[in-house]
Amino acid sequence: MIIERAEVVVTSPSRNFVTLRLVTDDGIVGLGDATLNGRELAVVAYLRDHVVPLLRGRDAHRIEDTWQFLYRGGYWRRGPVTMAAIAAVDMALWDIKARAAGMPLYQLLGGASREGLLAYGHASGSDLSELFDSVRAHLEQGFRAIRVQTGVPGLNAIYGIASQAAAAGGGEERYDHEPARRGALPMQEDWDTRAYLRHLPGVFEAVRNEFGPELPLLHDGHHRMTPLQAAKLGKELEPYDLFWLEDCTPAENQEALRLVRRHTTTPLAIGEVFNTVWDFKDLIREQLIDYVRGAVTHMGGITPLKKTMEYAALYQIRSGFHGPTDISPVGMAAQMHLGLAIHNFGIQEYMKHSARTDEVFRQSFRWRDGLLHPGDEPGLGVELDLDEAGRYPYEQAYLPFNRLADGTVHDW
Ligand code: GCO
Ligand code: MG
């Protein structure tokens, strides 16, 4: 089975998505997600100018060989642009192989290890009452695990706090401007770590008092703390029994996690910005994290993320794949198949895509009783409607950024 055509499709139904579409000589179409939020066109150029010419004429069945050829053959390894491009090829080839086999992809990855994937939703509010409404709205939508983000008194705009309507789960625009705003320059947010550290434990105490001890609660620190600050927060959150504290420090410095780990038993999740197993290697081997936050789209595809999870399994570390709306329905499907198959699945982040996105990408996943399932269509189970996609051209959009009170740029 030979790859005959390869094309890169850019569409922006409510935010930008980059999709690689491979067609084989016997007419099988495979899709891969290459979306890199805020830097989408760099991956488009990488694919169109450097990868597509290498794919035509290759045997579509040789997934591992093609991965190694693109990774090693490119010489310049790793990095989000390279790895998102390779990821798209890998996903599209797995899609093709599973379609050719007439099976949903998870069957080829070893078959289902569970009935469905526990998924967490994003609750947020500028104050406690908004936050409680948002948690309730998510529980009504069936979520059995909730990420809690909240405003901090004195700070105006903070990552992860949706508008009231969006947080309650209403409206077409929900989440789709999070965190990017289309057509605009980067939005400036403000930050004060000490104010945040003073405020957050009280928020979790209030949420536990309101919703009880059972509900799994998560929180995203979004790389903003020093190791010492993160250790202090982890310790202070221990009474509220978090499912995880995510990205507590900028984890490209893996050593930082040693200090955090020494001081707290709050579980740690890291890695949505990681690209290869090398970024996780020391964190896994030294058992400095509990959850791998990689996304199929940014980790170079299904093939390397599966290997990473097999390595993590040696240390009882589980998956918590990154699933915001900037992972396209194709990327989400790929990680649902992987999550269903691996033994050490932990939880899946799940932010619903907009109705317009769902018209461009027709999906067959199920969402029932708080569990996701990728469905039983052959392949990934996603069809890209090219006519619909063509109606929504690319729009420039940036992620926000943070400044401290004195004007210093800070991690957001
Ligand atoms: C999360 C993330 C996202 C990222 C976004 C960047 O935990 O879901 O932190 O919200 O900021 O995906 O593109
Ligand atoms: Mg995050």
Image: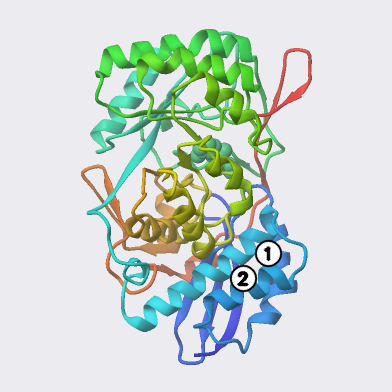
Is residue 11 shown above or below 191?
Answer: below
Query: What numbered label is drawn on residue 309?
Result: none
Within the displayed image, which quadrant is ligand 1 positioned in? Answer: top right
- In this orientation, does residue 180 appear? yes
Q: Is residue 137 left or right of residue 12?
A: left
Q: Residue at x 56, y 42 (%)?
A: 271
User: What's the colour scheme?
Assistant: rainbow
Residue underneath mark 2 = 8
| Residue linked to disc 1 | 44
The reply to whether the residue tagged 2 has its Cβ within 8 angstroms of ligand 1 is no
Between residue 386 and residue 276, name the one nearer to us: 276
* Residue drawn where x is 57% and y is 40% of the image: 283
Horizontal and vertical percent position of residue 104: 32, 70
Q: Residue at x 54, y 69 (%)?
A: 90
Instruction: Give, as a three-letter code, the residue at label 2.
Output: Val
Secondary structure found at label 1: helix
Query: On the image, which quarter does residue 115 sit in?
Result: bottom left
Q: Which residue is pictured at 38% across the width and 56% down the height?
A: 336
Residue nearest the observer in this picture, 253 or 58: 253
Q: Is residue 256 left or right of residue 111?
A: right
* Left/right of residue 314 with respect to residue 71 in the rendered view: left
Question: Is the residue under label 1 in contact with that under label 2 (CB below 8 Å)?
Answer: yes
